[in-house]
Image (cartoon, helix red, strand yellow):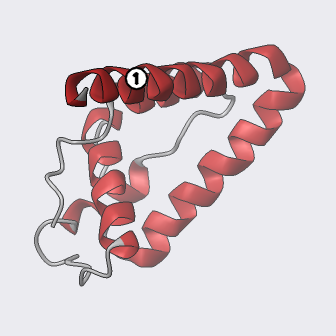
Amino acid sequence: MTDMTLLPARSQTKLALLNRRWNPAFDYRPLGGASHEKIWPLMYAYRSAIAHGVKLDFAKKLALLKNAEVANALVIDAVKKTIRQAYVEPRLVKDLHDVQVVQGITLATTYQARID
C-alpha cells in the first residue's frame, strides 16, 4: 500500500485552511476524534488503494477510518463543503486550485529539465 505520509503537504494545507472557514468544520468524532493531520494521510492512502486496485485494509493500515462508508462520507462532506465555500469565496477556491496547477507545471518543468 502507498506510504501514508505521501499526501502532498499542499493538499493537507488547503484542506486545513478550508476547514477553518467551514461552519460547521469537519466532524472527526466518527473517526475517534482523530486530528486532521492523522485522518487525511489515511484518506490519501484510501484513495490510492482504490485507484491502484489494492485491497482495502481497514483492519490495520486504514483502521482509523473504520470502513468504506465512513471514509466515503468524509469525502462527500469535503466536496459539499468545498462547493458551498465556492459560493461564499469563489476567488479563494479558484486560487487554491490554481496553486496546484502551477505547482504541477513547475514540478513537470523541473523534472523535464533534469532529463534534458
Q: Residue at x 38, y 74 (%)?
A: 50
Q: Is residue 35 left or right of residue 94?
A: left
Q: Secondary structure at mark 1?
A: helix
Depicted 92 relative to depicted 97: above or below:
above
Find residue 76 and report its horizontal and vertical position in percent.
63, 59
Q: Is residue 113 visible?
A: yes
Q: Is residue 22 above or below residue 60?
A: above
The part of the image, by quadrant, that contains residue 56 is bottom left
Q: Quadrant of residue 41?
A: top left
Q: Point out the residue furthest to the front here.
A: 116
Marker count (numbered): 1
Q: Name the foreground residue: 2 vs 23.
A: 2
Q: Amino acid at mark 1?
A: Thr
> Which quadrant: the C terminus?
top left
Q: Is residue 100 above or below residue 45?
A: above
- Percent across and percent down for residue 79 are 67, 49
Residue lying furthest right: 87
Residue 89 visible somewhere in the drawing: no
Label 1 packing within 10 angstroms: few (<14), some (14-19), many (20+): few
Q: Residue 97: horizontal and vertical position, in percent?
A: 64, 28
Residue nearer the viewer, 107 or 112:
112
Q: Which residue is mark 1?
A: 109
Q: Quadrant of the N terminus?
A: bottom left
Q: Please report the residue visible at 52 percent of the width from the left and 67 percent of the height from the top.
A: 72
Q: Residue at x 28, y 58 (%)?
A: 45
> Which residue is at a point 18% across and 59% down the rendered structure image?
2
Q: Left or right of 109: which side holds 35?
A: left
Give x and y (percent) for residue 24: 65, 34
Seen in the picture, residue 24 relative to 42 is either above or below; the reply is above
